[in-house]
Image (tube, grey):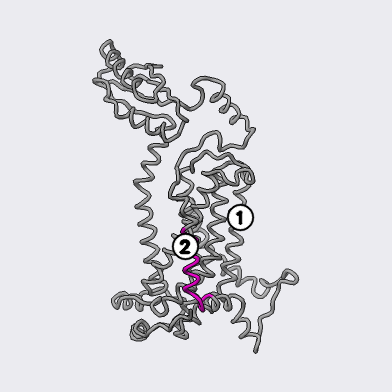
């Protein structure tokens, strides 16, 4: 998924920078042919042009920035409260309940669990390999003592050698827990703690062991992934906007948006709310890999919207030096683009929510929630409010970094803000906020 996603973005970027301009040059004015009736709007001129610049998104931003403290004081706690269910998330794996009810394989699995003693995925497999060659009498005695120790563990119903092949023996451990439950995963750890038979190495597997190792691997690598993503994001946003404040604020906004959407995932899929409406069976856990996939996708999309918005805001800031007007005008110029992009993604990714497979449905529902929160509550309300509170400090950077950005920053125009102007802007007092 990682390499596929990177390849898709790379191909799209190359196409947008090469093939698309070539096609636009070939089509020329014909690119505007075949307009949809009633949706075409002529470009306003004269007095109407000013009204267009001060449209609905401009008025919304102005309204928010007249009461920024109130908006922040309401929205931030609401997003945090929405994210509270994620604090009690239980990660699990995929079993037969991920399939739609009535699916033949699911019916068989349910029958094995309910109609046959020990049926289904309730075993832990331990493979013992003896280093001195084929298993002999001494090895069998050592293996017997090992099996007795495993059988004595709490929760184990039985342990026995079910197969041997040369120097290798398979020990099947049966228990009464649900196949990939927390209790089953804890039992895997206890089995692994049992000393190996003399002269042998024991490896413990099975579905519960697979999930235990998966969660351990994710727990070890996910923090590094987060640090890498956040670090690269901070650097790229600084190069784009010349501020150390805006990148940090963007990351915080994304965290709030993702927290709310992940909290909704737990409430819906782990707790089972809306299961009848959405047509799934709750397992009491969230499949472990899907939130990571959603995290990567939603974080990238959120940063896309952030760049759309802040590019226009930076453009107006460089032109006017008026922070409030720059934010309002930037939202007016980018609001329709962000809304259109969000609408497209809601339709495309939201189609996943119609799947009968639970973890695919979870991606669709979770991404729709994340996109809607980010494109509406965060971008249209919270970002203007926080930028109004920060005022000119939105564009602050330490002098060495400001000098670096003036020489190497990424700008869409040739206009360059001089360092004295930036320093003076940071020193000027912020206009008081109306209550």
Residue 77, disc: 2
- Furthest toward the front, the residue is 435
Q: Position of residue 28 (x, y in %)?
A: 64, 74
Residues drawn in magenta: 64-80
217 falls in the magenta region:
no
Percent x, y of residue 172: 40, 21
Residue 315 in the image: x percent, y percent?
Answer: 48, 79
What is the secondary structure assignment of the residue under circle 2?
Answer: helix
**Among numbered discs 1 and 2, the one appearing first in the sequence:** 2
Task: Say which of marks 1 and 2 sits in front.
Answer: 2
| 327 or 181: nearer the viewer | 181
Residue at 58 percent of width and 53 percent of height = 349
Q: Is residue 241 left or right of residue 136?
A: right
Crowd class of label 2 (few under 14; some 14 to 19; many from 20; radius 10 Å): few
Q: Which residue is mark 1?
A: 348
Residue 13 vertical position relative to residue 245 in the rendered view, above or below: above
Q: CA distance from mark 1 to mark 2?
A: 30 Å
Residue sitting at the far top: 137
Q: Is residue 337 visible?
A: yes
Query: How many marks on residues?
Result: 2
């Amino acid at each position: 998924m990682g390499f596929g996603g990177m390849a898709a973005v790379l191909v799209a970027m190359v196409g947008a920078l090469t093939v698309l301009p070539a096609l636009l040059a070939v089509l020329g004015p014909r690119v505007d042919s075949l307009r949809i009736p009633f949706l075409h709007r002529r470009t306003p001129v004269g007095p109407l042009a000013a009204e267009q610049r001060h449209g609905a998104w401009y008025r919304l931003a102005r309204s928010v920035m007249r009461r920024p403290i109130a908006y922040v004081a309401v929205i931030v706690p609401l997003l945090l409260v929405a994210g509270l269910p994620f604090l009690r998330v239980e990660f699990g794996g995929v079993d037969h309940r991920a399939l739609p009810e009535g699916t033949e394989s699911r019916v068989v699995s349910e029958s094995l669990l309910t109609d046959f003693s020990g049926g289904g995925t309730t075993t832990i497999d331990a493979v013992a390999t003896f280093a001195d060659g084929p298993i002999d009498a001494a090895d069998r005695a050592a293996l017997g003592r090992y099996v007795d120790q495993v059988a004595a563990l709490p929760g184990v119903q039985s342990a026995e050698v079910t197969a041997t092949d040369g120097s290798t023996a398979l020990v099947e451990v049966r228990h009464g827990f649900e196949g990939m439950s927390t209790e089953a995963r804890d039992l895997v750890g206890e089995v692994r703690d049992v000393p190996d038979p003399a002269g042998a190495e024991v490896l413990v597997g099975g579905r519960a062991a697979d999930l235990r190792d998966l969660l351990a691997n994710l727990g070890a690598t996910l923090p590094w992934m987060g640090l890498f993503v956040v670090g690269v994001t901070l650097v790229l946003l600084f190069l784009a906007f010349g501020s150390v404040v805006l990148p940090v604020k963007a990351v915080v906004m994304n965290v709030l948006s993702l927290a709310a959407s992940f909290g909704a995932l737990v409430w819906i899929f782990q707790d089972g709310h809306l299961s009848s409406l959405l047509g799934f069976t709750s397992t009491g856990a969230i499949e472990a890999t899907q939130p990571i996939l959603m995290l990567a996708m939603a974080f990238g999309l959120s940063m896309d919207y952030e760049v759309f918005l802040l590019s226009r805001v930076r453009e107006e800031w460089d032109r006017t030096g008026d922070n409030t007007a720059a934010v309002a005008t930037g939202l007016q110029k980018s609001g329709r683009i962000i809304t259109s992009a969000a609408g497209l993604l809601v339709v495309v990714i939201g189609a996943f929510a119609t799947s009968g497979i639970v973890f695919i449905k979870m991606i669709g529902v979770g991404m729709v929630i994340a996109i809607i929160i980010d494109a509406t509550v965060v971008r249209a309300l919270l970002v203007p409010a926080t930028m109004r509170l920060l005022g000119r400090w939105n564009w602050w950077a330490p002098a060495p970094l400001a000098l670096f950005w003036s020489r190497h920053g990424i700008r869409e125009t040739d206009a360059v803000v001089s360092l004295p102007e930036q320093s003076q802007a940071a020193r000027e007092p912020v206009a008081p906020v109306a209550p």
